[in-house]
Amino acid sequence: MSTTPLPAKASLSQLRARAKELRKAVAKGRPDAIERAREHHPSYDEAAFTLRDAQLTIAREHGLASWPELMEKVATELVEGRELHRYFGVELNNETWDLLEEIDETSPLGDQERLLYGAYAACLHWLEAGNEANHARGEHLIARVALRIGRIDVGLQHARRCLELIETHREQMSDWDEPFAREALARALAATGQTAAARAELEKARELTKLVAGEGDRKVLDEELAKEPWFGLTS
């Protein structure tokens, strides 16, 4: 199996983009992409080639056994100390969001655990390198992941903590933080059968979304509000 050295000043965001491109190329049946997957993936399955499979392929192309090893190698060559925490906070956050729609409570337990622990790890790194806004966003991600994989009580706990941080430290928040917090809390309340409270939070999230100044931020919020699971609240 041939390998390629990592380029100087390798960027994990660029490597992640390459993995996304590889997944799409395999899905489209491109021969070059399929050949790369067959050569470097230990259990290649064209019919179920996920983003994690693509990431593993990219890592093995560079002579590393796993995507986490690749992440660590790139990070330690670039940054140290507090910046290392910031780096991993960003990368783990992005990776968890990338995988969120691929994994749910029907996925293998190991995949569910990796998704949840990735969200916790991102939050931990932001506790070291960020502020209360970063902490709140970490709590939001944990809540969304927990709800996605059926850990309802965990999701409710972190959704409430997210909103608490936002209400306590408003001066550090962006205008889109509270609608995101209300969205997560609405989902969690719906999942626990508290339908009236959930509808109230969802309505608050929608109203606050309309007040967000940035068009791009409003679009992201609208897209998230349209995604399941809503546990029957929006059906």
Image: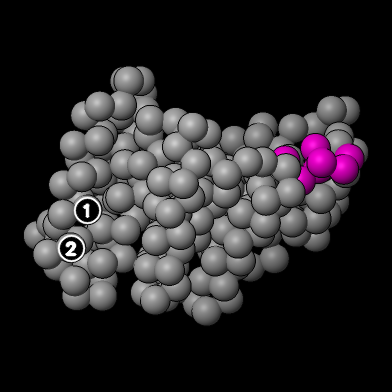
| Near-viewer residue (4 or 10) | 10
202 sits to left or right of 165: left
Depth check, front residue: 178 or 138: 178
Which residue shows up at 14% across the image and 57% down it? 199
Residue type indicated by callout 1: Glu
Q: Residue 171: within the magenta? A: no
The circle on residue 197 is 2
Contact between labelled residues 1 and 2, with CB atoms less than 8 Å apart: yes
Q: Is residue 184 above or below residue 224?
A: below
Q: Where's the N terminus, which quadrant?
A: bottom right
Describe residue 194's horizontal placement relative to residue 216 as left or right. left
Regarding mark 2 in the picture, which secondary structure is present there?
helix
Q: Is residue 130 left or right of residue 201?
A: right
Which region shows up in magenta? 80-86
What residue do we see at 54% from left, 66% from top?
A: 116
Q: Quadrant of residue 19?
A: top right
**Residue 9, position in %: x, y?**
84, 28
Q: Position of residue 47 (x, y in %)?
A: 45, 61
Q: Marks 2 and 1, Cα distance to the nearest angstrom?
A: 6 Å
The answer to whether residue 56 shows anywhere in this view is no
Q: Which mark is residue 201?
A: 1
